[in-house]
Image (cartoon, grey):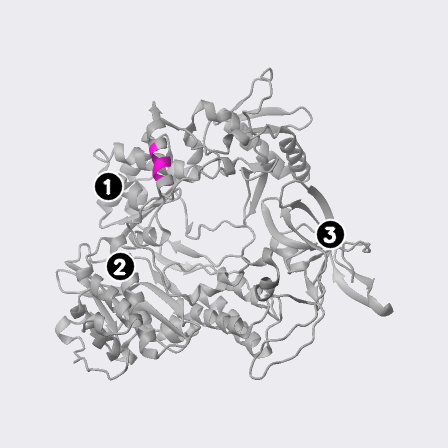
Amino acid sequence: MNQQNVPTNENATSHHVQHQAHDNDNRFSVPNRISLRTVPIIVKNGSKQLTVNALLDDGSSKSYINADVAAELGLDIVSNAQLITVNVTNGRKETFETAPVKFHIEGLNDQVKMGMEATTTTCVTGNLRTVDWNKQSGQFKHLNDVNIEKSIEKFWEIEHISQKGSTMSVEDESIVKQVKSTITCSEGHYQVSIPWNEKKPSLKNNYEMALQRLRNTEKKIEKDPVVKEAYETTLQKYQNKGYITEVNPNESFNDSEWYLPHFPVVKLDRETTKVRIVFDAAAKSEGLSLNEAIYQGPKLQNELFDVLLRFRSQPIAIMCDIEEMYLRVGINPIDRSYHRFLWNSSTPIRYEFKTLVFGVNASPFLAQYVSRHNAELHKEEYPRAAETVFSSTYMDDSMDSVSTVVEGIELYYQLSELWAKANMYARKWLSNSADVLEKIPTEHRASKVELDKNDLPTVKTLGVTWLANEDCFIFNVQESDNYTTLTKRTILRKIGTIFDPHGFVAPYIVRAKILMQELWLAGFDWDEIVPNEMNETFLRWLSELKELKQIKIPRCIRHESYVQPKRVTLHAFGDASEKAYGSVVYARCEDSDNNISVRLVAAKSRVAPVKTISIPRLELLAAVLCLKLTLSICAALNICINNCTFWTDSMNVLHWIRNRSTIFKPFVANRIGEIQYHSNPIQWRHVQGKQNPADILSRGCSISYLETNELWWNAPEFLKKNECEWPKSKVEFSHENS
């Protein structure tokens, strides 16, 4: 089958193959290859885009696109599906079902932009296999840095959990100082300067490029009256609110201006069509984009992992969204000419932003800096709200928890007033307390909140939702695609869509990670169909996804009736098997009446390293993971590490921890040194394997098994008893050569 200008997510370099199996190995030798003429391009549908390879064939009379690419981009079908017959080699013909679709393509250098129509097919390159260019890169210098396998190797690399206290680079410190020296506030309106870099003088007027992009956008929205009306309404709202202003028509053109292309992002839900305008600051003109001339700035926003922990720490939860956060921060007048855009291509009108623009790389940093600066200025007046801004705000969402209804109401008032001091307005308030909600106007409330902030339209996401009325988390489950055969690419894509930041269902997810490693070790190419046994294994895993909707996880990590527990401790369990290792941490809360509750806080799993190591050493990796995960939780919840207990069923690990690290070989010595630096050996205790919840994590399990497993959700029963009734063990000395 011939193709011309065919977008495909396959590596379009194909080859003739001789399948020559090695003894006891699933790899293939590929002695003869034919490299076809290909070019990388960007395929776009509105805001959705994929970078793919186009296979060029001068003799083709039609263009084709892989059906999975068309589906992922959400391409509109021009007409009904139909059966077509094409001529292939040796007089043969093939018939298949296809549907015509329309889309846009762009070159990676932004010099080529065009719309086109193609018909869908199952696989553009047919049965031709792709070349693993990682293996062949030594023959071609320009491929030396190719390493696509890194995206899956992270499953079994030695675990690293970020710790607080990381320092800024010299460049980032300079950027912060620059913004600090230029920030101003007049009548509650903050204004900042753009942190330009040395490429700013190279920016040239890109009016013609922006005008052409505008024409493409107008053609698109003309086809949908709802989108067009929403687009025009949004721009009018921006003008009415003073976010943008029309440029004087008499102002001459010069090189001190830049025009932002823009396009709609359409999000359909059950009730309405939501349209958001995206301004493309990454668009290049003469080889340079606006973003490339601006320092991005350091990351100031909190880790989502930490914010969610604080959101779960107390019985009364409260959260809100900051309306139009970027648009509430002004930019220096001397920078505004570089934030212009065009409207009405027939008689172009020039507009100029007076505020931060969503899409400019420095906007997240500048918005976060302003919000923190404002909280610092007013922390004496609004101490609780300032703490929420500093520690419990993620992007434009503030989400925190407090002990009592009175504190919840006070936090609502403080946050509302503190954000208003920055000319920002909190909305979409939500709480699990009816008493708190009564103080919030109905029009300012939300009904539920999706905790998954991933807004990538090309990914079907398995998200986590907080149900405020039940005060629990549930998993949103979208119907799985009807896969019958799978490749390494589709498996990795499916694993990557699961959003489970605190590891609630880590024992289920680790099964897929283990399978991914097996595929990697077998040497399968990204788009090679996996063997039947592996295919069936993953399809079984995939079929369980729908069962996730049955799982409900209490939001609060302590029992809601414990208004102020007299003691909160953390208990971390670690375990390892030949295939994986992991850690799970629980919060043990005891109130003044000696009532005790134990709830799951977070879990982490890792696939065992590719290089074979002994089970005792894997148990040691699990112990280090225990420590790091616990340190992260302690930092987020302000819990002293001395209030933590670590549990393992490995006597070897306990023996190593209670000896001088210097007597062991480097692998053990380095990790024992880290454990002893951050914890006291007396904090490490022995637990029987059948009482160790991390055993479930290291071996993996089904959703149905996990759903009703008390050990996983509530830890061993002995933690609900007094400490004197906990397991006691005498550390035995191991004769293993460490």
- In the rendered view of the protein, which quadrant contains the C terminus? bottom left
**Splitting the image into 4 quarters, where does residue 157 fall?**
bottom left
Amino acid type at mark 2 = Leu
User: Which mark is in front, 3 or 1?
Assistant: 3
Amino acid type at mark 1 = Arg
Tell me the residue that label 1 is attached to. 384
Tell me the residue that label 2 is attached to. 631
Residue 216 position within the rendered picture, expressed as x and y whole percent measured from the top left: 67, 37
| Residue drawn 41% across the image and 45% down it | 446
Residue 444 position within the rendered picture, expressed as x and y whole percent measured from the top left: 39, 39
Which is nearer the eye, 446 or 465? 465
Tell me the residue that label 3 is attached to. 5
Q: Which contiguous range is marked in magenta?
A: 172-177
**Splitting the image into 4 quarters, where does residue 383 fall?**
top left
Other residues around mark 2 within 10 Å, as few (<14) / some (14–19) / many (≥20): many
Other residues around mark 3 within 10 Å, as few (<14) / some (14–19) / many (≥20): many
